[in-house]
């Protein structure tokens, strides 16, 4: 089991919201209205760890090890929402999300292949780590800069934990796991070819609720994410390339084969998928 070891690792570096956030360093003059509004939107978005956890537990009923790990992931992700709301409660109480606004992002995700979902969220952690690093750079108020840096480090650790479960899946399921990971890897490393940000909170997950079946579509301002990325934290091609490089680097480690471009990963995806195709007599 991976859960006991991961628990010890993540417990040893877990930060305390009262002791490790420098609340006394707050500088009101350094927080703009537009910055405060983005904190509000991110606080609501982070609350979506709740329906994501419900999805993971439902779709991984046969995997008690991974399901137990969800207790760590869920706790730490919900704390992200909580610390952002605590920041607003202290310094901009008029912007604290309402309980209804938080509840609005809780809805049922359709069942999906667990291996593909695992890879999707692994890539999501990589992307969010980079988004939050850019957010820390963009913000000018010292406390929120510290918070976003702290959250980005959590997301990196979560990605590392998911990677451990992906390695285990390859040991257990071989080519099937490799095909699933390569398929989603190609998708998530191809953001430059899409009109929307490729992150689990921005993907459609329930046809019956379309078009309000993404987390972002249920925010008070559904257009917020793209504006935040493009106009505020300036998540440009240079930063997008950093995400792609991390995905390809980790795919290279997983598959024990070097991928320097999405095209190379896609060729591998086709090769490994072909080995799984039923042979015609």
Image (cartoon, rainbow, N blue to C red):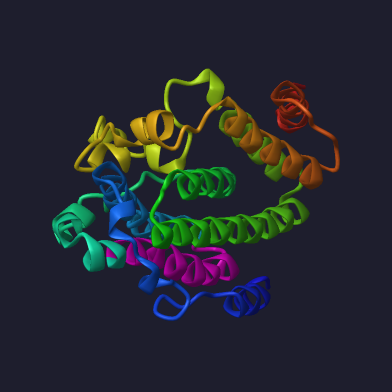
**Image quarter of the C terminus:** top right
Q: In this view, does 183 lie to the left or right of 271?
A: left
| Front residue of this view, candidates 63 and 209 | 209
In reply to whether residue 232 is colored magenta, the answer given is no
Position of residue 54 measured from the top left corner of the image (x, y, whole percent): 38, 59
Q: Can you see residue 60?
A: yes
**Image quarter of the N terminus:** bottom right
Q: Which residue is drawn at 64% across and 30% down?
A: 241
Is the magenta region chiefly helix, strand or loop?
A: helix
Q: Is residue 226 left or right of residue 15?
A: left
Residue lying farthest right? 257
Chain part drawn in magenta: 61-85
In reply to whether residue 79 is colored magenta, the answer given is yes
Position of residue 49 measured from the top left corner of the image (x, y, whole percent): 39, 57
Quadrant of the rendered image containing residue 25: bottom left
Q: Can you see residue 203?
A: no
Q: Residue at x 39, y 37 (%)?
A: 202
Q: Is residue 160 depicted above or below 190 in this figure?
A: below
Q: In this view, does 207 lie to the left or right of 192?
A: left
Q: Which residue is drawn at 24% across and 68% down?
A: 90
Q: Is residue 135 depicted above or below 56 in this figure?
A: above
Position of residue 235 measured from the top left corner of the image (x, y, whole percent): 50, 33
How many numbered tags mark residues here? Answer: 0
Position of residue 252 measured from the top left corner of the image (x, y, whole percent): 79, 40
| Front residue of this view, candidates 196 and 264 | 196
Q: Residue at x 79, y 31 (%)?
A: 259
| Front residue of this view, candidates 57 and 185 | 185
Q: Is residue 48 depicted above or below 261 in this figure?
A: below
């Amino acid at each position: 089991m991976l859960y006991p070891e991961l628990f010890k690792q993540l417990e040893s570096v877990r930060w305390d919201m009262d002791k490790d956030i420098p609340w006394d360093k707050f500088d009101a003059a350094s927080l703009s209205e537009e910055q405060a509004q983005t904190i509000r939107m991110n606080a609501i978005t982070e609350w979506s760890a709740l329906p994501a956890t419900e999805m993971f537990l439902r779709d991984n009923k046969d995997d008690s090890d991974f399901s137990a790990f969800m207790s760590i992931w869920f706790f730490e992700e919900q704390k992200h929402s909580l610390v952002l709301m605590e920041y607003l409660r202290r310094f901009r109480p008029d912007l604290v999300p309402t309980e209804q606004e938080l509840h609005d992002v809780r809805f049922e995700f359709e069942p999906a292949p667990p291996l593909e979902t695992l890879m999707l969220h692994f890539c999501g952690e990589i992307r969010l780590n980079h988004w939050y690093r850019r957010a820390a750079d963009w913000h000018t108020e010292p406390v929120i800069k510290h918070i976003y840096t702290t959250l980005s480090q959590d997301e990196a650790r979560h990605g590392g934990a998911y990677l451990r479960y992906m390695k285990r899946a390859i040991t257990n399921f071989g080519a099937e796991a490799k095909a699933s990971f390569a398929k989603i890897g190609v998708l998530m490393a191809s953001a430059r070819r899409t009109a929307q940000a490729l992150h689990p909170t921005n993907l459609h997950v329930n046809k019956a609720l379309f078009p309000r079946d993404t987390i972002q579509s249920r925010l008070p301002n559904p257009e917020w994410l793209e504006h935040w990325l493009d106009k505020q934290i300036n998540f440009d091609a240079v930063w997008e390339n950093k995400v792609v490089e991390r995905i390809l680097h980790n795919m290279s480690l997983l598959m024990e084969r070097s991928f320097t471009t999405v095209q190379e990963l896609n060729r591998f995806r086709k090769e490994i998928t072909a080995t799984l195709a039923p042979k015609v007599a």
